[in-house]
Image (cartoon, rainbow, N blue to C red):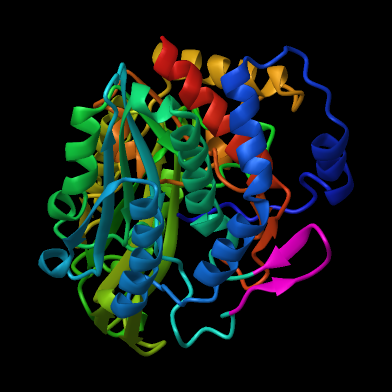
């Protein structure tokens, strides 16, 4: 969700080099060798599934399209012996979620794997098809965010099944249908994900993370929307600032936003950001939240009666969010004469706070990567990452790690690009990580 746009990340040449010339730094045990070999054999099938899924429009509000992609992946998981269930989304105005489960006969670990079926590209978008750029690159709606990640987790699980290693794991897969535009109420929209997390010990997310196969997410900032509504006394503009009229709604909105921007308490909070994304002011306003539009009527010779600002706030922990909300509310309360203002905060994505467990899981993943000759994996700076569904699971498990999906760039744009060789690389890492977790 809301992938940060990036350019100049991992180049094709260096990625290909890593895939074609790596040397194992630790000899895999026989099971690990079989995992790797199976993934290599399934490379063409994995690419075919990716292309088929990308070519099926599944913009969040294309409910039938999301369900169709869910059926495609549901059939694939069923072929691997998973019990597949579709959670209907009518109660939260979305298509729903795919849940797939497998409980191994010798299960030692309960693992939740997280992906999503929807994209930001609705049927009216001009961006609809998988297009090969060259041998190692392709564009397509959702190729990296995150249909590639769904294919990667399926590859890893298929390899584990073939080797028998899947029997050491209790696995739940949740592919949500509304990650890009969550249904409401949020508690109902995310219930399947939270329930699966409460059952699990470990959560792994297959978003494309920072767009680079050398990184993963041990933390993600939460994303909460806020709205500021301001009122003033309407009057002829020649009377603005008069003792009984005051400055009007637009000046008060400007004062508040400037105070947010310059406040030392807010600006000194590491990883905290707060952004006004839309503003309107005048005599009358017409707000259309579902369409993200606000229209205003007003004249230059009239003191503004109303102003509205929509924005978001991103924090790394619940405690940081609480502090920031309190400070913003205090600033809003310091009204200019004859104005009033109120700020409200919507429900949103909670933070995935960094933890010792998450760091340990990253260390295990990096060790796997180095043993396979792919080099170390480092943590993404939370300022570089958007919100994601794993945030709803992270508080309920011992360890969580995200960004295990397909490498890519330009997410949420018609230039979204995936690095095709990463399908194999990431699947191998995920399979060996899951295998080693099952041995613990």
Indicate the position of residue 289 as horizontal and vertical percent values: 26, 74
- Hey, which residue is sitting farthest left in the picture? 91
Report the front residue among 238 and 57: 57
Percent across and percent down for residue 346 are: 22, 53
Residue at 72% in and 65% down: 138
Look at 27% across and 27% down and name the residue there. Answer: 395
Is 34 positioned to the left or the right of 329 in the image? right
Residue 65 relative to residue 93: left or right: right
Q: Nearer the viewer, residue 247 or 33?
A: 33
Name the spot of residue 427 as percent of width and height, x first: 59, 39
- Give the residues in magenta: 129-139
268 left or right, relative to 352: right
User: Please, is residue 366 above or below residue 66 in the view?
Assistant: above
Q: Is 268 one of the magenta-colored residues?
A: no
State yes or no: residue 132 in magenta: yes
User: Residue at left 29%, top 54%?
Assistant: 226
Residue nearest the observer in this picture, 109 or 246: 109
In this rendering, does residue 381 appear at all?
no
Q: In which quadrant is the N terminus drawn?
A: bottom left
Q: Measured along the vertical axis of the image, is residue 417 above or below residue 371?
A: below
């Amino acid at each position: 969700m809301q992938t940060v746009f990036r350019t100049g990340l991992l180049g094709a040449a260096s990625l290909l080099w890593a895939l074609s010339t790596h040397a194992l730094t630790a000899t895999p045990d026989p099971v690990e060798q079989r995992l790797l070999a199976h993934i290599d054999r399934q490379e063409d099938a994995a690419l075919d599934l990716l292309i088929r899924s990308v070519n099926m429009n599944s913009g969040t509000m294309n409910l039938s399209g999301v369900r169709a992609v869910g059926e495609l992946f549901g059939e694939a998981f069923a072929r691997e012996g998973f019990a597949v269930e579709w959670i209907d989304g009518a109660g939260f105005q979305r298509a729903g979620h795919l849940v797939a489960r497998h409980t191994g006969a010798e299960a030692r670990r309960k693992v939740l794997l997280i992906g999503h079926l929807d994209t930001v590209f609705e049927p009216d978008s001009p961006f609809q098809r998988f297009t090969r750029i060259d041998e190692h690159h392709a564009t397509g709606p959702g190729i990296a965010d995150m249909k590639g990640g769904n294919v990667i987790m399926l590859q890893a699980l298929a390899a584990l099944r073939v080797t028998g290693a899947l029997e050491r794991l209790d696995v739940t897969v949740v592919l949500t249908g509304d990650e890009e535009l969550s249904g409401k109420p949020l508690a109902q929209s995310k219930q399947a994900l939270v329930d699966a997390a409460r059952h699990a010990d470990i959560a792994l997310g297959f978003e494309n993370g920072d767009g680079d196969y050398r990184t993963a997410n041990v933390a993600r900032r939460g994303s909460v929307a806020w709205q500021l509504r301001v009122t003033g006394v309407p009057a002829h503009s020649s009377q603005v600032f008069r003792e009984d009229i005051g400055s009007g709604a637009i000046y008060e909105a400007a004062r508040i936003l400037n105070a947010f921007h310059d406040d030392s308490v807010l600006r000194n909070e590491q990883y905290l950001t707060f952004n006004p994304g839309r503003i309107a002011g005048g005599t009358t306003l017409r707000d259309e939240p579902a369409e993200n539009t606000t229209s205003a009527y007003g004249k230059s010779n009239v003191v503004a009666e109303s102003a509205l600002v929509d924005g978001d706030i991103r924090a790394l922990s619940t405690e940081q969010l609480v502090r920031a909300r309190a400070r913003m509310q205090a600033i809003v309360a310091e009204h200019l004469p004859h104005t009033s203002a109120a700020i409200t905060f919507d429900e949103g994505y909670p933070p995935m706070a960094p933890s010792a467990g998450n760091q340990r899981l990253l260390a295990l993943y990096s060790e796997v990567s180095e043993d396979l000759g792919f080099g170390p994996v480092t943590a993404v700076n939370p300022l570089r990452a958007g919100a994601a569904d794993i945030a709803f699971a992270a508080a309920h498990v011992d360890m969580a790690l995200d960004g295990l999906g397909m490498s890519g760039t330009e997410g949420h744009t018609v230039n979204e690009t995936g690095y095709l060789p990463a399908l194999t690389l990431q699947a191998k890492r995920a399979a060996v990580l899951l295998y080693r977790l099952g041995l613990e």
